[in-house]
Image: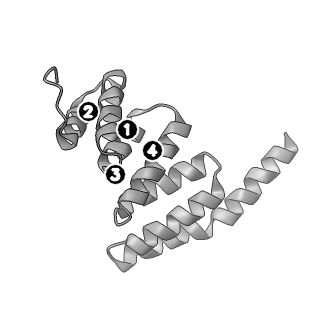
């Protein structure tokens, strides 16, 4: 690392192997500054961060840059649900279904999308009761 690599793949791989997020995130930020369109750096930056808002931002960028990665879409959609960003979750589930490699995955993601409205209603009800 001391050599100051400008290879985004090497930087990203190094950061993925680094167990300490405080050390990994600056390396991933450096990779993104070198190549802002390298989806893996955005994805792993999101994985390493504890801040849900930062994770949402990085994962949204990563899925936009690598729209065929259906697993990423599914994880991003679930994070959106967890953060009560239901409209974005619905879009992400549809994108996961579109990128799915087979009918079984596609059906699973569309089924998850179909419960978004119910989850949104439950969340709204919970806020009104509080």
* Side of 67 relative to 120 (left or right): left
Q: Are marks 2 and 1 in contact (CB under 8 Å)?
A: yes
Q: Reading the chain from its start, which is encountered first: label 2 or label 1?
A: 2
The C terminus sits in image quarter: top right
Between the C-alphas of marks 2 and 4, the distance is 15 Å
Between the C-alphas of marks 4 and 1, the distance is 7 Å
Q: Position of residue 32 (x, y in %)?
A: 34, 40
Q: Which mark, residue 37?
A: 3
Q: Are marks 4 and 1 in contact (CB under 8 Å)?
A: yes
Instruction: Report the mark closest to the observer, 3 or 4.
Output: 3
Regarding mark 1 in the picture, which secondary structure is present there? helix
Between the C-alphas of marks 3 and 1, the distance is 13 Å
Residue under the image location 46 percent in, 75 percent down: 107
Residue under the image location 39 percent in, 52 percent down: 62
Residue under the image location 74 percent in, 51 percent down: 123
Q: Reading the chain from its start, which is encountered first: label 2 or label 3?
A: 2
* Side of 11 relative to 101 (left or right): left
Q: Which residue is mark 4?
A: 58
* Side of 122 relative to 75 (left or right): right
Instruction: Report the mark closest to the observer, 2 or 3.
Output: 3
Instruction: Report the mark closest to the observer, 3 or 1.
Output: 3
Q: Position of residue 92 (x, y in %)?
A: 51, 62
User: Where, by quadrant of the figure, is residue 115 drawn?
Assistant: bottom right
Regarding mark 3 in the picture, which secondary structure is present there? loop
Residue under the image location 38 percent in, 71 percent down: 99
User: Where, by quadrant of the figure, is residue 114 drawn?
Assistant: bottom right
Q: Which residue is mark 2?
A: 15
Between the C-alphas of marks 3 and 4, the distance is 12 Å
Q: Are marks 2 and 4 in contact (CB under 8 Å)?
A: no
Query: Alpha-carbon neighbours of circle 2 within 10 Å: few (<14), some, or many (≥20)?
Result: many
Q: Which mark, residue 45?
A: 1
Q: Reading the chain from its start, which is encountered first: label 4 or label 1?
A: 1
């Amino acid at each position: 690392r001391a050599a100051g690599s400008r290879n985004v793949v090497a930087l990203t791989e190094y950061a993925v192997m680094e167990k300490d997020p405080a050390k990994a995130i600056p390396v991933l930020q450096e990779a993104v500054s070198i190549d802002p369109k390298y989806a893996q750096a955005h994805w792993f930056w999101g994985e390493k961060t504890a801040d849900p808002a930062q994770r949402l931002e990085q994962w949204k960028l990563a899925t936009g840059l690598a729209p065929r990665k259906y697993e990423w879409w599914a994880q991003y959609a679930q994070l959106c649900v967890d953060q009560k960003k239901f409209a974005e979750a619905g879009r992400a589930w549809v994108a996961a279904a579109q990128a799915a490699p087979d009918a079984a995955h596609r059906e699973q993601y569309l089924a998850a999308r179909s419960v978004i409205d119910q989850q949104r209603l439950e969340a709204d009800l919970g806020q009104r009761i509080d």
